[in-house]
Amino acid sequence: MVQNTPLERIPAILKAQRSFFATHATLPLEYRLGMLRRLREGILRHEKALCDALYKDLHKSYEEAYLTEISIILGEIDNFLKHLKAWAAPSTKRTPLKLFPSRSAVITEPLGVALIIAPWNYPVQLLLNPLIGAIAAGCTAIVKPSPYTPNVAEALEELIRELFDKEYICLVQGNREVNSALLKERYDIIFFTGSPQLGRVVMRAAAENATPVILELGGKSPVVIDKSANIAIAAKRIAWGKTLNAGQTCIAPDYVLIHREVKSAFSEAFARTIRELHGDDVRLSKHYVRLVSDAAFERVSSYIGEGRVLFGGNTVAEERYIEPTLIDNVALDSKVMTTEIFGPVLPLIEIEEMEEAIRFINEREKPLALYVFAEKERALNVIRHTSSGGACINDTIMHIANENLPFGGVGNSGMGRYHGRDSLYSFSHRRSVLMTTTWLDLPFRYMPYKWFKWAKRLL
């Protein structure tokens, strides 16, 4: 059982981190690279413990745990080990003639103490991936795992405690009471992953101290299937994306806008693909995750009755098991169509033309992800005329696996972005510096502006 960090300890932890950051120990590039190497080695040593904890909390198989958590973290670290020196180097900028004989540059410097609050759905990846950016930037960090995955929280605490001194990286445990206590303090940046509702709570708290925030939220990520799509491939990739982590993914396909002519073919292909991925009885699949809590099970299972079941629909409450379920005939004002599903229920909405899908998406909050299955030009037309945090054409989920692509939301689905160089910049201040020599002091700028006519020509 995870024990709450005593609330009275939180100000002392923060004070110790500020003192350590003030020593400038985290600034040298070799220190940061060394800490990233240490984290990488630690993850490899603790890989089994982390994956075992993911299975206990979520019934996540080793293969899925490695693919969606461990491998992404290792790829992010390797990307930084390869590129951090170049990314962190001062960037020379062109200086206009009017500022002669000055030179200009942008330097990347750490913001300071970071607070990172992680969710439960990918509890290892979504705590350690932001931490990689904080370490690379030269920040210290207080990290907070979710209490809803207690075995993972304990495994992460053991990892962090083994690798880092608390004044550098400190893991804090607890529930929303601890979150509230953490958010009462002042940080140099807050990185939060969770629901839009909780994101607003974090943003309000950060506003008290004018603290910058990175909010990785969620929302209803739509799929558009045109009649020009390869239906077999669309069904396979959507079924995979929807059943990954049992749909408990912030960028999971949330609902499908599908052309009327291919709806029946898609439904059949989806059912066939589920059996190929998980067997005739999905409940027996070692790769099929369970819902995280009884409350999550009750909420998601209630959505099944809001439409006509085309496939699936079976549930086992004591296991928190919900079969992948395809439904149609849903009301647009129903819960399943107005809240993020975060589970393996997938509604279908018929459309007659792609413009109808574009209107449907634009009338709602901007999603974290958008997936379009269509011929290239028809797909690009949807991308050009909508807005989302990220997007895939003829695929789902996979844009998050490319550490060279920034990941983040827009509007209600979040703000700020990370992965790769964007992670470095998210935890850094990009400081403009003008360097002027003293061997020459031109008179143009000085009062009483005797040279104004000549200076005006340079401006």
Image (cartoon, rainbow, N blue to C red):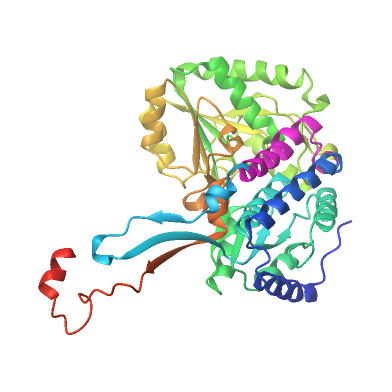
Please state which of residues 78 and 98 is positioned toward the viewer in this rendering: 98
Snapshot quadrant of residue 451: bottom left
22 sits left or right of 366 in the view: right
Which residue shows up at 59% across the image and 68% down it?
A: 188
Label count reads 0
User: Which quarter of the rendered picture does the C terminus lie within?
Assistant: bottom left
Q: Main secondary structure of the magenta part?
A: helix
Please state which of residues 214 and 341 is positioned toward the viewer in this rendering: 214
153 sits left or right of 250 in the view: right
The magenta stretch spans residue 66: yes
In the orientation shown, which residue stands out farthest toward the front?
439
Q: Is residue 23 above or below residue 375?
A: below
Q: Position of residue 71 (x, y in %)?
A: 71, 36
Q: Is residue 408 above or below residue 375?
A: below
Residue 180 appearing in the image: yes
Q: Position of residue 211 (x, y in %)?
A: 55, 68
The magenta stretch spans residue 295: no
In the orientation shown, which residue stands out farthest toward the left?
453
Magenta segment boundaries in residue numbering: 55-81
288 sits left or right of 237 in the view: right
Residue 198 appearing in the image: no
Which residue shows up at 77% across the image and 63% down it?
A: 172
In the orientation shown, which residue stands out farthest toward the right?
1
